[in-house]
Image: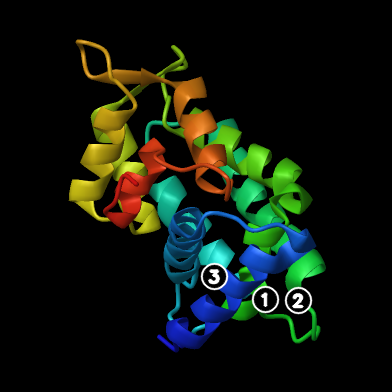
Amino acid sequence: MVWHSGVQSESLISALTESGGQRKVIGMQKTAINRVKLVFTLLDADGTGYLEAEDFDLMATRVVAASPDSGEAAKAAMISAFRRYWTTLAAELDTNRDNRISFEEYSACVLSPERFDEALTDFAEALGALGDPDGDGLIKRHDFMALMMAIGFQPANIDALFDAFGPSDDDQIAVPVWVAGIKDYYSPEKTGIPGDHLIGTTA
């Protein structure tokens, strides 16, 4: 893994603070940066230090394989969502047109998350549907764990996230709860959200 988080994080903090002449809470910035940094690391499925189309195909394969009981339509939708996510990122962030995205380029999604709303919603809804193989609108803990571990999150953090979503007595959460949680994760203004458990903090 090629990683230069110190310089890039400092640069991003400065940009977040000064963008538009508005000062933002430093703690919020660091939380948002840490969330983005973690996702970048996980999406870099082949460990080159850059995001490329192959990473998203590899990740899609892993995630779909983690939900063998899901229908073919749900699996196809998940694969399509990963590919749309990549094409959207490439179109918006690959500033030097080298067909790969560095962390510095990727971090722009913190500054302008609205540029990725449609692709993120597509991704969140596809992942939520994949976690509900019987179509009852509920996600069981073991299905949730399997998908999140396939993405690469740590089991203890996944458990903490599921608990933060407020599961029912039979240990299930509603699909819309997870979909909303995924979208919140990518919102830099959101702090103290369930998704912060994935980076080991609940600021």
> Disc 2 on helix, strand or loop?
loop
What is the spatial separation of the Cα atoms under label 3 and label 2, in whole angstroms? 15 Å
The crowding category of the residue bearing disc 3, from other C-alpha atoms within 10 Å (few below 14, some 14 to 19, many at least 20), is: many
**As shown in the figure, which amino acid type bears the numbered disc 3?**
Asp
User: Contact (CB < 8 A) between labels 3 and 2?
Assistant: no
Numbered tag placed on residue 55 in the rendering: 3
**As shown in the figure, which amino acid type bears the numbered disc 1?**
Glu
Specify which label sits upstream in the sequence, 2 or 1: 2
Is residue 119 positioned above or below 21 on the image? above
User: Contact (CB < 8 A) between labels 2 and 1?
Assistant: yes
User: Which is more toward the observer, 35 or 118?
Assistant: 35
**Left-right relation of 85 to 195:** right
**Left-right relation of 59 to 91:** left
What is the spatial separation of the Cα atoms under label 3 and label 1, in whole angstroms? 16 Å
What is the spatial separation of the Cα atoms under label 2 and label 1, in whole angstroms? 7 Å
The x, y position of residue 92, in whole percent, is 79, 65
**Left-right relation of 28 to 54:** left
Disc 2 target residue: 94
Count of picture labels: 3
Disc 1 target residue: 105
Name the residue: 42% across, 25% down.
133
Location of residue 112 by image quarter: bottom right
The crowding category of the residue bearing disc 1, from other C-alpha atoms within 10 Å (few below 14, some 14 to 19, many at least 20), is: some
